[in-house]
Amino acid sequence: MTRFALILMTSTALTGPAWAGMLAIEKPDLTLGFIKLTDMAPLAIAYEKQFFEDEGLFVTLEPQANWKVLLDRVISGELDGAHMLAGQPLAATIGYGTAAHIVTPFSMDLNGNAITVSNDVWALMRPEIPAGPDGRPAHPINASALRPAIEAQAAAGQAFEMGMVFPVSTHNYELRYWLAAGGIHPGFYAPGDAMGQSGAEVLISVTPPPQMPSTMEAGTIDGYSVGEPWNQQAVFKGIGVPVITDNEIWKNNPEKVFGLTAEFAEENPQTVLALTKALIRAAEWLDADGGANRAEAAEILSRPEYVGADAAVIANSMTGHFEFEKGDLRPAPDFNIFFREYATYPFYSDAIWTLTQMRRWGQIAEAKPDDWFFDTARSVYKPEIYLQAARLLVEDGNADEADFPWQSDGFKPATDAFIDGIPYDSRTPNAYLQSLPIGLKDDQTVTAAGVQG
């Protein structure tokens, strides 16, 4: 039995009131990384509300230049942990890109992304979109409405290009899912290919989140998939129109996670429990009382040391609304979910969906049996740590028993809450891949000559 498991067992026994909060923290001074997006909010709130300090931690938060730098610095030990794309711990652990065993005991949020297009693209899309009873565009908007813009670009001898934040980001998979659901092929990844544009009707490439509005305004890309505040920034600047939120693509989809190396978790189990406790408290604060704290959260996030965007831009989505076409402000109470719906619990089924999309588009080059998906999810997602932290919070009087999925086996029920209505059952990942009209099937592989098999 590992030292990590032994200490977890010991701390499980010490859950009485006399022991509440008294973890034997191995490393109290921590440096944690993040990218300037609103979904880093649990880190900012845990710091500003002194939840880290309450748990005996002294934390420095450091913004990072991009997702690759962030991951590399966690692996090197320069950062003790970080706000991560959900796909990063999985990709690193299976050796796609930078190889390292990364684990997550905490999911940072649900939803929070959108897809935005330039004004020129929107002008070509708009006639393709049916109107709702109020005359505004009916949502969700199908990607098939992009077809006239794609064809216009092709007629002019130009590719239609869109940005996303990183090859293993949810932004990439959501953009590809939306395009494919509308009958538009987003392309495959061949071995050694970081672009994923084989057979693509739309070329998708990496653009750092804060640079997306200016890159689109310059005409380098025609649209992008990103988290907030960079979709609402396009509206405020008058340069583009968000056309769909990720909650419309997949209702209550998983977004970021908190990641650290398996080695750090093994050597510092009590520290990881304390971190998880503080982050759970921060997430609960963000969703408390029907979002009563969101305006304050927007002000905190607007500070230059965090997101550094105007508080009004951040508040546009953080306070339960989302603006599409300028003036088309709609209720969006679930655009950001930080604690409700068990948002912070690291479900294996969320990891498995990400892995299916990696296989669907060729990042996982060869077919894998269902058990491989399950085993990989369990090696990265650590609900046992999460529940131990939650139990300690309940014993401390800082959380309610009813707020946690104590009986979960890590698998959510099957759902068809996708834009195309295709059901996803995480217990049958290969059957799910077979059900998707566009994407790799069975033993198909991607080569320089295209899809084989």
Image (cartoon, grey):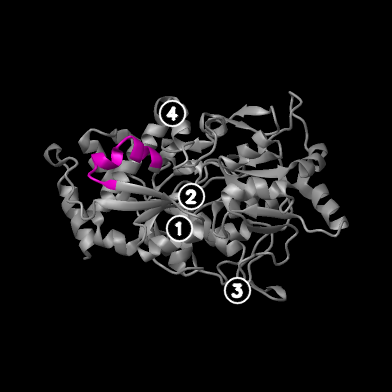
Instruction: State the residue at coordinates (72%, 58%).
Output: 185
Q: Is residue 47 magenta?
A: yes
**Amino acid on which disc 1 is placed:** Leu
Give the Cα distance between marks 2 and 1: 8 Å
**Amino acid on which disc 3 is placed:** Pro
Instruction: State the residue at coordinates (44%, 69%).
Output: 99
Contact, CB < 8 Å: mark 4 with mark 2?
Answer: no
Q: Position of residue 179 (x, y in %)?
A: 69, 51
Contact, CB < 8 Å: mark 3 with mark 2?
Answer: no
The residue identified by callout 4 is 296
Compare marks 1 and 3 and give the one earlier in the sequence: 1
**Amino acid on which disc 2 is placed:** Ile
Which of labels 1 and 3 is toward the front?
1
Give the Cα distance between marks 3 and 2: 28 Å
The disc label shown at residue 35, or none = 2
What residue span does the magenta drawing correspond to? 44-58
Give the Cα distance between marks 4 and 1: 27 Å
* Secondary element type, mark 2: loop
Compare marks 3 and 4 and give the one earlier in the sequence: 3
The disc label shown at residue 128, or none = none
**Residue 348 quadrant:** bottom left
Give the Cα distance between marks 4 and 2: 20 Å
**Amino acid on which disc 4 is placed:** Glu
- Residue 117 vs 5, above or below: the answer is above
Dominant SS of magenta comes to helix
